[in-house]
Amino acid sequence: MSSEIGPPNTGVRFRSGGYSNGGGLQSGARGGSEMPTSEILRAKLRAPAPRGLRRERLLKQCYDELTPVVVVVGPAGSGKSTLLSQVAASTDSPVGWYRVTEDDSTEHTLGRYLCAAAREMGFSLEPETNSIDAVLGELDRIGDVDALLIIDDAHEIADSGAETALGRFVALRPPRLRIILGTRRTLDINLPRLVVSGEARVIDQDQLRFRSWEVEELFATFYGEPLSPEPAARLTRRTGGWAAGLQLFHLATSKLADCDRQRAVGHLTGHSRLVRAYLARNVLAELPADQRWFMTHTASLELMTPALCDTLLGISDSGRILQQLTERQLFTECDDVGRTFRYHEVLRTYLELALLEANGERETKAWYLRTARVLEEAGEHRHAAHAYAKASDWAAVSRLVRHAAGCTVPIGNDDPLITCSEWQTDPWLALALARLRVREGAIAEAEQVYRAARELLDDPEFVARCESERRELLAWLPGASVDARLLQHWLGPLRAALRAPNTGRAATEPGAPKARFVEGMCALSAGDIASAREAMVEAQAADEPIAAISSRLVVTIVDALRGAMPDPAVVNDLASRCYREGLLWLERVCRGLQELVLMRDLPAEWRADICEEMLVECEKVDDHWGAGLLTFGLALVALHRRDPTAFDRFEDAARRFERLNAPVLVVWSRVLGLNPAALDIVARSKQAAAAAHGVGLHRAEMMALSYATGYDKSRSPTLKELAPMTAHQTDPIRGAVLPAIGIFCFGGYRLEAFGQIVDLTGLRPQARILLHLLSMTPNLDYHREVLEDALWPGAAHEVACHRLQVAVSSVRGLLGEYGMTLQRSDESYRLATPGYVFSDVVEFERALSNAAARTDPEAARDRVASLEYALTLYTGDLLQEDGPAEFVASERHRLRSAAASAAVALAEDYVALGDSVKADIAAHRAVDLNPYQDRPWWIMVDIREKAGDMSAAEQVRLDHRRVQEELGLVES
């Protein structure tokens, strides 16, 4: 729709190829030649027919020959083009008209069109003149250039090379060439200097707005529907004298009686910010249903032709409808002499809102996607990019941008298809950009863009939509407070859980996949790995892409921590799905974590480099959460690989999470980053424990305190030291790097709960033995009679049963604090632990089974890893403090023999691998465990003989003979 208001000025006509005021110069009168139509769109050089009310106060400023440069600047619909067309039609000088479009953004293109405009004014320029300097040189050669050049829509080349070139052209123009620029924004042409020197004047938005007497004259002389002075003055105040608003009001009330029209002005309340919305909606309401439907569903095209509309709508009479709408003055015709149409920008904005209201979010996105494909097939890539953006198909936008730029360009910054001015003026593009920034993880920038989008459209529903989505981000901003009012989004409970562990109840329907995802993430943040995995398995069925993809990713990571080799194809598929869904921040996290989990079994420096690049990319786009998670992941892998940089990485992660106001993640970073070798480890561990206690992280608190317990770590490895070794096992512990409970029966009984040694001194001897017995097979049942016979042999059943109940009660009272208990099922008892328990006995036997299963020569190193792990676990006899107790003696002997056999097998494997030093150490270990085996002795002898140390070999033979003599196998 044109912003031009009023009937045609029949006294002055503009003819194609030149201008005429009744008998002036015609195009080519001075010998100009035309540019090839394949290069120059002549419609850009054709001034529109003069329309609207002639406002002499503005025209006089444009006619003033003493001010050679006039800049008419104002927003869409303020009457700029109307004024310029009136000037073009009524001036006595030769006139050149050039309407700039967004594809004129290079100096070369601008120069060609300026050259063509000069020819339209009747000046002869060389055919190849296309640079600004060349155009200026040609005009200087002509000499007397007494003409008017009008350049409309100059804002289309803002922030481009063409804008700079235009500034040079204006500054160096021939002395008698007058220039009038129409633009929506101030251009970079050093306008202040021109104004101060008297060479330029600015007609701004305030001067363009209609005064009350002009409004009265407009309705009386042009529309033929007079308004009395008081309603005219009120309408002027309500619309702010906005030209397009006045025309919209006329269209909305054209069928009303005079009295009803006068009353309609009162509906535009003075305190309402929704005047434009009111007017646009009323225009639509007055249309027939078929035209209203047509307009609503073609607004997505932006640029319309009958063929495009027919293809999009699947009809064949779009041309007829377009002509009907044109007659109602709802279009601005452009380019091909009435074959291409545009809605006025304000009306199109509200048509897009009407489309959303009619179809809903999902169907509207699908419609924009259909529109984009139609436009792309027609070669309208710029408009296709707009439609793809509004459909949130960022992969398609990237593809078009990459094709246009020849390289990867950040969308919304230096994007050649959607200019900065378009992001800043089109509310729907601005909203799309805000959503893109959210998907990129740039939360702070997204919040700012939402604010800007909100100001572009005075519609309550649009404003509410922007504000609702903006408020969902506030709690995730760096340094933001977590206000309960900001946590209404379905991810709100997770954000709260990052401040303090909670029950993880989601804001959506309990038990639904999306709710289970939130519960799982809350459990994960609290350190409950087993519960987290269980919830995440169920959450994979969620309709929400973030929940479905993230839950599958978490399951993969948890399984990798348990030791399972991740399938690269699965993680790669997750990353690809993130890309298809436009979740760019999650795609970076997926690809980074893919390399991290693979680095455990396939270490390579380039994998670490990829993760570092992902981290840099996060920082570049201000994705602070993604950067924090990747830093934390790098720290975990470094810790697993015993890389000393792990502790610095954890500290870096802690600082990042502090800036994000996520104390739970800060605590985990500080606890996992405790360096046992640090001189101040005790003080640091107590500080970390206090911080964990402050946010309610019991597991982290116990883990931190374990560094300050002071027990002899050289005697037995801790759970923190043993758990990472399970990465080399085919079926390692189920849980996490650090399981909640660790039970150690070799080399003396020890129970670890959440990183802290459990003090058993409060238990009576028989209760302690009961705990020892059940700990040999945690979470497995022992029949009551077996326990009674083992603890109180020979005692009467009634007495033994009572004593057992007392002992069970005593153990329950102690273990309840650590989330463990003794459960009774019928006539059996078991030691029940939360999640999965680490048991050195169970792990020892699993490691031996893994080694026995690897019989191929190619699996020698894997077999060695399993045997080494088993012997690391075997730190001494089973429950040695319980002495010769019958219930443990036979099991103790069996496990010791198994350890001795494992040491022999390890020595033989090291011999086969050519590592004589480790083979000798393993053989010594075998002899220590069971000196009555012959094989380790002969291995030691053979190693010394091959080394040429015959005396040492003989000493080993003598020691072996002494053992044989003790057994009576040889005579002394």
Image: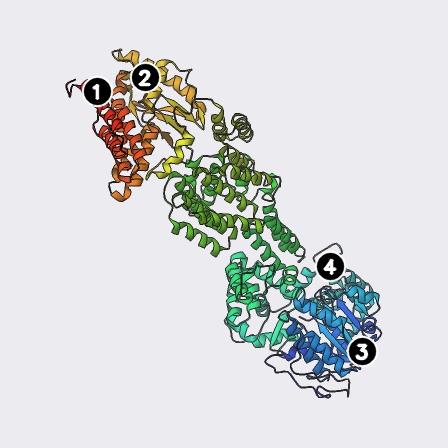
Q: Which of marks 3 and 4 is in front?
A: 3
In the rendered view, tell whether residue 958 sits above or below residue 851: above
| Residue plotted at (62% across, 58% down) | 430
| Residue plotted at (46% across, 49% down) | 590
Picture coordinates of residue 929 (x, y %)? 27, 24
Q: In this view, does 70 lie to the left or right of 888?
A: right
For residue 176, the mark is 3
Q: In which quarter of the image is residue 240?
A: bottom right
- Amino acid type at circle 2 is Asp
Q: Nearer the viewer, mark 3 or mark 1?
A: 1
- Amino acid type at circle 1 is Arg
User: Which badge, 4 or 1, comes first in the chain's sequence?
Assistant: 4
Q: Residue tagged by mark 4?
A: 268
Q: Residues within 10 Å of mark 1 (few under 14, many from 20)?
A: some
In the rendered view, tell whether residue 107 sits above or below residue 737: below
Q: Residue tagged by mark 2?
A: 882
| Residue plotted at (40% across, 42% down) | 560
User: Which badge, 3 or 1, comes first in the chain's sequence?
Assistant: 3
Q: Distance between the residues labelled 3 and 1?
A: 121 Å
